[in-house]
Image (tube, helix red, strand yellow):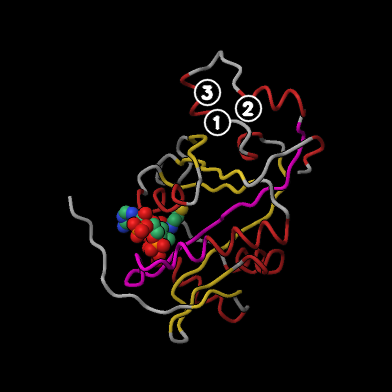
């Protein structure tokens, strides 16, 4: 089966979003995804984690964004220490991750959460989504020292799942009926670095 892959390439820049560009981000979101947020939510993310809220620009036009949040969690799946989907096939085995958890007794960790990413149709499949994700991962690591990064994605969203897998995210959990229309979500997690006692690397 052949895939549609545009030949054209554009030059683009990735940079932090400015407050007066939030309207353009919202427009891209509304054209690209069924999950919409109110203005105050974008503003909150900008105020709290504006250094990892990025846009892609082509000829002075915003064509893509990635919006992230930094969280503290005690959820081992989000830390990348457990994989519920793998555990389903070998439920009674104490795997290496179980052993690691027992040894270090990790309680909490700082994790990055990709809240939303989208590229305008017409600018997709040119590497812009990858560039946004790559830059965001680097910044979350450098600025916040995250141990892992996670996100939710519709189980049917193959383009996004392939993008995330390319960056080393693995499917770690299913949340049934996560989306308003009832579709399930995969939680995908990328381990950044080992976690040791006290949640510090
Ligand atoms: C997911 C999305 C952000 C990817 O952006 P993009 O700029 O097209 O991504 P890239 O060009 O960097 O593609 C990177 C890889 O993702 C995968 N991919 C992207 N689009 C794909 C498609 N239509 N079919 C299959 N794989 C695809 C490929 O592995 C691709 O690498 P390749 O081109 O070398 O094969 C974009 O498709 C989008 O905005 N979709 C709508 C919004 C959305 O679903 N967001 C994710 C919500 S969780």
Q: Nearer the viewer, mark 2 or mark 3?
A: 2
Please give the label number shown on residue 87. Answer: 3
Q: Position of residue 167 (x, y in %)?
A: 49, 51
Of 8 and 63, the residue lying toward us: 8
Residue 91 located left or right of residue 59: right
Q: Position of residue 195 (x, y in %)?
A: 72, 39
Report the residue marked by disc 1. 83
Residue 47, above or below 89: below
Of 88 and 141, the residue lying toward us: 141
Q: Identify the magenta region.
A: 106-133
Residue 16, quarter of the rendered image: bottom right
Secondary-structure class at tag 2: helix
Q: Earlier in the sequence, mark 2 or mark 3?
A: 3
Dot 3 and dot 1 residues touching (CB under 8 Å): yes
The residue that appears at 53% across and 16% down in the rendered structure is: 91
Neighbor class of circle 1 (other Cα within 10 Å; few <14, some 14-19, many 20+) is many
Dot 2 and dot 3 residues touching (CB under 8 Å): no
Disc 1 to disc 2, C-alpha distance = 9 Å
């Amino acid at each position: 089966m052949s895939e549609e892959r545009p030949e054209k390439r554009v030059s683009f820049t990735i940079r932090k979003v400015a407050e007066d560009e939030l309207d353009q981000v919202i427009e891209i979101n509304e054209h690209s995804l069924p999950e919409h947020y109110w203005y105050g939510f974008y503003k909150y993310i900008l105020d709290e984690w504006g250094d990892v809220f990025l846009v892609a620009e082509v000829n002075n036009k915003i064509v893509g964004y990635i919006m992230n949040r930094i969280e503290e969690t005690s959820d081992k799946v989000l830390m990348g220490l457990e994989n519920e989907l793998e555990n389903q096939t070998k439920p009674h085995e104490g795997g290496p991750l179980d052993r690691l958890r027992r040894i270090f007794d990790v309680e909490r960790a700082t994790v990055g959460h990709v809240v939303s990413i989208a590229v305008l149709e017409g600018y997709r499949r040119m590497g812009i989504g990858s560039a946004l994700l790559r830059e965001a991962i680097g910044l979350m690591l450098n600025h916040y020292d995250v141990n892992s990064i996670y996100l939710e994605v519709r189980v049917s969203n193959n383009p996004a799942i392939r993008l995330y897998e390319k960056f080393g995210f693995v499917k770690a959990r299913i949340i049934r009926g996560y989306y308003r229309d009832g579709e399930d979500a995969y939680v995908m997690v990328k381990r950044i670095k080992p976690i040791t006692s006290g949640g510090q690397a």
